[in-house]
Image (cartoon, rainbow, N blue to C red):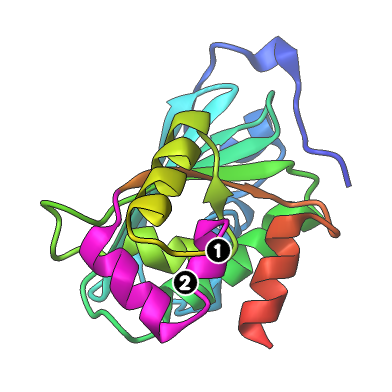
Amino acid sequence: MPVNYNSSFDGQKINEDNCFSITGYDAKTLLTFTGVNGYTPSFTYEISGTYPMLRVKVFHAEYELQCTIYFDETRVKNEYFHVKLPAQGIEQKIFTAQATALAANGFDNIRMHALGGEGLPDYTGHITWAKLGFTMDFGSEILQFRSVMKDHKRKEQTLNDLVKTEDGCNFWMRNGFSWNGLFKLSENSENQKILKHYLA
């Protein structure tokens, strides 16, 4: 199914009341593009934006998140995802539902910024999102990763390989850094394969 995009609506302000008439998706469907349906049906949300860009914010007692949907570019950026109760598997449940919904509706990819590492002791996104299949998107960060591996005489070639083990996760918790991630939604992408292996 291709993504709904109609350039004649470019520049129109979007809210919950008019989102279906402009985007072709009602609020319930747009919320599945964040993945929140994979965890709990109880939350509050805001929908806003200027077409072809739409922002969805979700508020829950256990987490908050914000996604930006780019209909003309068939991609989504996960701007913010803060889990208030770590180690509950919330990220996994929500992201798996999000990836499934976006792939089914013709979107190409998801991008995000994985927070963690030096100066951010309360964040573990730099580990979690690699486990869930995001790969480093910026060449400069890939080179930085390889430099860290070389300096510590480690053999892992990618961050995704590193976080497969407890030792690797502990190492990245001590020596890692925040990075920009990409998840390609095509069925046979490397990202999907990593996610399926992790969930198996």
Viewport quadrant of the C terminus: bottom right
Report the side of 60 relative to 131 (left or right): left
Secondary structure, mark 2, is loop
Label 2, on which residue? 163
Amino acid type at image mark 2: Val
Residue 176 pos. (x, y %): 30, 56
Q: Is residue 13 visible?
A: yes
According to the picture, the residue beneath numbered tag 1 turns out to be 160
Query: Could you say whether the residue bearing mark 1 is in a helix, strand or loop?
Result: helix
How many angstroms separate mark 2 from mark 1 (CA)? 6 Å
Left or right of 174? Residue 121 is left
Q: Do the numbered discs 2 and 1 sit on residues whose CB atoms are within 8 Å?
A: yes
> How would you rate the neighbour count of disc 2 (Cα within 10 Å): few for under 14, some for 14-19, many for 20 or more?
many
Q: Which residues are magenta?
A: 157-177
Is 28 in the magenta?
no
Could you tell me if residue 36 is visible in this image?
A: no
Task: Please tell me which residue is depicted at 15% across the width and 65% down the height of the picture.
Answer: 122
Q: Residue at x 39, y 40 (%)?
A: 144
With respect to residue 54, does 148 lie above or below?
below
- Judge whether residue 170 is colored magenta: yes
